[in-house]
Amino acid sequence: MSHHRLFAQLAFERALGMAALNALAQAVAECDQFRAVGRERDPIHFWVLAGELEDVVQDRIRDVLDGPGLAVVERGEFFHQPRIVELVIAARDARTAPS
């Protein structure tokens, strides 16, 4: 494999990882925003939608863990989003912890 092709593959994997991490950051921000402004709404609907948003966040965390996003976090490339890094590392540790 040529050096250019290898570099292109690594750049592509990094881009996929960053995209997954950005999707996770957006999901977390939307969940936080909904919780901040939605408490005065109908309580039943609030908790249903809050639960659905939390499911989306968990799906995005799985996307990061199952793809190249975890490597991006482990290399320290997502340092500007410490909360997202903490979520990913905690999920990674929980996944690898012995039962």
Image (spheres, grey):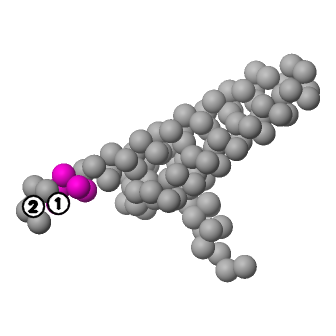
Q: Residue at x 13, y 56 (%)?
A: 5
Q: Which mark is residue 6?
A: 1
In the rendered image, which quarter contains the N terminus? bottom left
Label 2 to label 1, Cα distance in Å? 5 Å
Decide: is 49 above or below 13. above
Residue 71: name its quadrant: bottom left
Q: Which residue is drawn at 91% across and 27% down?
A: 43
* x and y percentages locating residue 81 in the rendered image: 49, 43
* x and y percentages locating residue 76 in the rendered image: 40, 56
Q: Residue at x 43, y 49 (%)?
A: 79
Decide: is 1 above or below 30. below
Decide: is 56 above or below 77. above
Q: Residue furthest bottom?
A: 98
* x and y percentages locating residue 55 in the rendered image: 70, 44
In the rendered image, which quarter contains the C terminus? bottom right
Tell me whether the residue at label 2 lies in contact with that at label 1, contact meaning CB atoms closer than 8 angstroms: yes
Q: Judge from the rendering whether residue 37 lies leftward or rightward of residue 40; answer left or right.
A: left
Q: Which amino acid does label 1 sit on?
A: Leu
Q: Name the residue under label 2.
A: 3
Q: Which amino acid does label 2 sit on?
A: His
